[in-house]
Image (cartoon, rainbow, N blue to C red):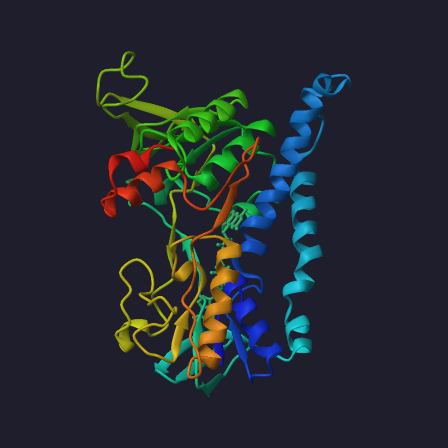
């Protein structure tokens, strides 16, 4: 088996393959551990922890202690984040996976045909491998909107923020573009660590996959943490003038500030740094999917067995969706590994009935399976009688 990508999806796939004594090669172009370890869950949760402690110090009276304004250097917070990554890294390392029986190659993989992968090795040269089955676990990357002036004025994403800020103080004025879980978690954390944060969301509410009450709750706690939340605001352009950077937004019709601003009135928000967190797109280009004719409209098209157009090529993790979580990537990896290795005997349909997830704003928002809005939507597609929709 060949596994492309050593994030959660690829690591778990190759772990399972090695456990059942299959001959498995794992190929990673960048950092072992993928997004979760290096740019995602681990650094963001480490930042959130520091921000939470700072907040608890400020409000220590809630716990019978004295309120104490936290004194800290943001650089030390960032140093700790990199230490947390380094502490966990051995779990996902080349050494560990080699010991488990996985051949690990550092390089960029590209399909030559449905059974052959060519690897441009990071330290030079190429290697060509063939396999009975191949698992694509190439993940996703931050989506960058086509916003006039954004490239010129500069921005950070969850990929770049951890290194960019490693040697800096927290930005004084931070704009977070995007009201999803990543934007909301980071907006609150930076606000608690002293940044003046404005969060801009085009839709009417934050975290739109959650029920309305949950979105309202999230907005309330973010505002309490000092985040200036602008829902129903469309970003129009970024511009630099007089040595300052601005994002220009327009209030949408259903905006809460409708009374204060005429519809479509432009508002300029000054910032030092802009964090672009408007979603993550599957990595689909550059490694030969198009040449094989594998459908890639937004994600890799797979069937219930995570099988692509080719019965020997499977896909798992963010590159497939529909959920972009580490534990879902691992969950899918089991199906990709088992179906890829033993599918000729028995195949298993991937089961998404009970997917848990948490958004690590504080307090955290957690759920398992369908929420109310999804249950209602699902019931309406099943054409169930209205009475069954009552919860
Ligand atoms: C800020 C942030 C916070 C997050 N917080 C959480 C959280 O709290 N909980 C949670 O469950 N999830 C969280 N996530 C999501 C989680 O990180 C992803 O769902 C998970 O990393 C997906 O794993 P993956 O294996 O599909 O892809 P990735 O981890 O992206 O791994 C894919 C790997 O493939 C490699 N690759 C790509 N193309 C090639 C190629 N052609 N050849 C060789 N290698 C290639 C890439 O370099 C990459 O390392 C967060 C994400 C972000 C950005």
Please provide percent x and percent y for residue 50.
66, 36
Report the residue that reaches farthest toward the top. Answer: 259
Please provide percent x and percent y for residue 128.
45, 86
Q: Where, by quadrant of the figure, is residue 207 drawn?
A: top left
Q: Decide if residue 133 is in sight here.
A: yes
For this view, does 322 lie left or right of residue 84?
left
Q: Where, by quadrant of the figure, is residue 263 drawn?
A: top left
Which of the pair 296/191 is nearer the observer? 296
Please provide percent x and percent y for residue 369.
45, 46
| Above or below for 6 versus 127 | above
Please provide percent x and percent y for residue 193.
61, 30
Q: Residue at x 54, y 62 (%)?
A: 8
Q: Decide if residue 244 is in sight here.
A: no
Which of the pair 273/212 is nearer the observer? 212
| Above or below for 326 versus 310 | above
Which of the pair 353/305 is nearer the observer? 353
| Above or below for 91 versus 158 | below
For this view, does 52 lie left or right of residue 26?
right
Q: Residue at x 49, y 60 (%)?
A: 329
Numbered-mark total: 0
Which quadrant: the C terminus?
top left
């Amino acid at each position: 088996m060949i596994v492309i990508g050593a994030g959660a999806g690829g690591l778990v796939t190759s772990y399972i393959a090695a456990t059942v004594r299959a001959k498995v090669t794992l190929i990673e172009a960048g950092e072992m551990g993928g997004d979760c370890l290096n740019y995602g869950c681990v650094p963001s949760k480490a930042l959130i922890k520091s921000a939470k402690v700072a907040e608890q110090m400020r409000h220590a009276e809630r716990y019978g202690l004295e309120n104490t304004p936290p004194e800290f250097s943001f650089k030390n917070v960032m140093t700790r984040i990199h230490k947390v990554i380094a502490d966990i890294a051995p779990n996902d390392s080349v050494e560990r996976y080699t010991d488990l029986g996985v051949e690990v190659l550092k390089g960029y993989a590209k399909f030559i045909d449905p059974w052959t992968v060519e690897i441009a090795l990071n330290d030079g040269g190429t290697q060509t491998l063939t396999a009975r089955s191949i698992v694509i676990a190439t993940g996703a990357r931050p989506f960058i909107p086509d916003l006039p002036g954004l490239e010129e004025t500069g921005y950070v994403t969850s990929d770049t923020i951890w290194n960019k800020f490693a040697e800096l103080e927290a930005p004084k004025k931070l704009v977070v573009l995007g009201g999803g879980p990543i934007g909301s978690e980071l907006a609150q954390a930076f606000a608690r660590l002293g940044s003046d944060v404005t969060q801009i969301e085009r839709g009417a509410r934050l975290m739109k996959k959650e029920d309305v009450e949950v979105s309202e709750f999230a907005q309330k706690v973010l505002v309490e943490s000092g985040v200036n939340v602008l829902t129903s605001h469309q970003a129009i352009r970024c511009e630099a003038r007089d040595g300052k950077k601005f994002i220009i937004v327009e209030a949408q019709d259903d905006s809460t500030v409708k009374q204060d601003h005429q519809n479509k009135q432009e508002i300029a928000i000054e910032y030092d740094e802009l964090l672009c967190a408007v979603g993550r797109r599957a990595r689909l280009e550059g490694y030969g999917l198009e040449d094989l004719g594998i459908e890639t409209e937004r994600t890799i098209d797979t069937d219930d067995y995570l099988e692509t157009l080719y019965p020997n090529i499977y896909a798992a993790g963010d590159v497939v969706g529909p959920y972009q979580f580490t534990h879902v990537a691992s969950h899918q990896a089991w199906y990709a590994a088992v179906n890829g290795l033993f599918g000729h005997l028995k195949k298993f349909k991937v089961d998404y009935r009970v997917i848990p997830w948490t958004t690590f704003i504080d307090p955290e928002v957690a759920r398992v399976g369908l929420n109310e809005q999804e249950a209602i939507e699902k019931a309406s597609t099943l054409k169930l009688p209205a009475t069954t929709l009552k919860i």
